[in-house]
Amino acid sequence: MMDSICLFELLRYAIGKSDICNKSIGIDWDRIYGYAQGQGVTALVFDAIDRSYSSRHPLNIGFKTKMNWIGDVQQMEAIYDLHKNIIINLAKFYQQCGIRMMLLKGIGLSYDYPIPNHRPCGDIDIYLYGDLKRGDRLIKEQFGVTIDTDYHKHTVFELGGVKIENHYDFANYHKHWSSKRLDKWLKQEAENSYHTNNNIWLPSPNFNAIFLVRHAASHFAAEGITIRHLLDWAFFVEKHYNEVDWEWQWKICKEQNMNQFLLAVNNICVRYLGFDNLIFRTGGDENLTERILNDILQPEFQEKNPTNVLPYVLSRGKRWWANRWKHRIVYPEGMLTTLFSQISAHLMKPATLGNNKG
């Protein structure tokens, strides 16, 4: 508990939501370092350490831990540059082929951060406005890559050692049928994306106001989320608050049964991360907020996914049962309907039975 209190204090200080950081005595910096890594905020917490050196109360961190931390941050910045170059070159290639490329999540969200390259990069998610098959064929011909079609929402290929997820859907309605309507709306709203430099398109604020909630909610129900997901949302709301139709967003979240999850996330962003309560809809069940926060900090179900097929299936079954409370605040379907649709989805894509493909 003390680690999480310290971590939130450091984060508020790092992102300018607090001018005071008194946690300079008695901190186990190796534990905080590991905790920050697990929550996807390694560079942001180091920003607090860095900021403290220009204040009157520098944080006293051991030399070895500090050097390891600096190395991690530098590696993160290098990966960010790699991703950025791949995105620019990929968008240029598609543009030369007459295909628009929209960038989802990732670096697009990093532009809302105080220091963009201190948001960690994962996969690169793109959308080609209905040209996925042609885009995949051209990529395969040009670069000789293998196109993996074992996923429900997207195909996958690699460029420069980085995984690219090429989306044809935004919500996995094969596993949750209620997402069909949501996916249709997101595809309509994708047409309102805006053009940036380097031939890249970014989603409209109204698109992200729904997509980011669904993305975080679905990950929360299936596996879990981290503080980085909360910061993605918080920085987005702060940057684009005046560009979003929030009443329409709230209506869709209620229809999709994500409203209680959204309220809890907003509560955490305001109370623990220091964001302005005037731009977040808060309230809801206080006990639920604390349970969601505790699950983010230390998931209730922590069993690792085995690699072999049968143990994997059994483990996923146990996780599914343990996480049914999450399902009830994320999806409108009942558990039996969900079980049937997920079995059907796996039968459609049998390769998903032995791995974590969605």
Image: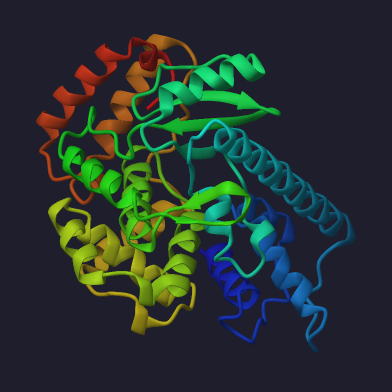
- 271 horizontally vs 97: left or right: left
Q: Nearer the viewer, residue 222 or 259?
A: 259
Vertical placement of 73 versus 130: above or below? Answer: below
Question: Where does residue 155 sit, x and y in percent of width and height?
Answer: 44, 24
Q: Outermost residue toward the right?
A: 63
Quadrant hosting residue 178: top left
Quadrant hosting residue 140: top right
- 9 horizontally vs 33: left or right: left
**Looking at the image, how many numbered discs can be counted on the residues?**
0
In this view of the protein, can residue 345 be seen by the observer?
Answer: yes
- 84 horizontally vs 236: left or right: right
Residue found at x 48% / y 78%: 274
In this view of the protein, can residue 32 be seen by the observer?
Answer: no
Quadrant hosting residue 349: top left
The quarter of the rendered structure image containing the C terminus is: top left
Question: Where does residue 83 sit, x and y in percent of width and height?
Answer: 67, 42
Residue found at x 16% / y 42%: 181
Question: Where does residue 72 sit, x and y in percent of width and height?
Answer: 77, 49
Question: Where does residue 34 sit, x and y in percent of width and height?
Answer: 66, 51
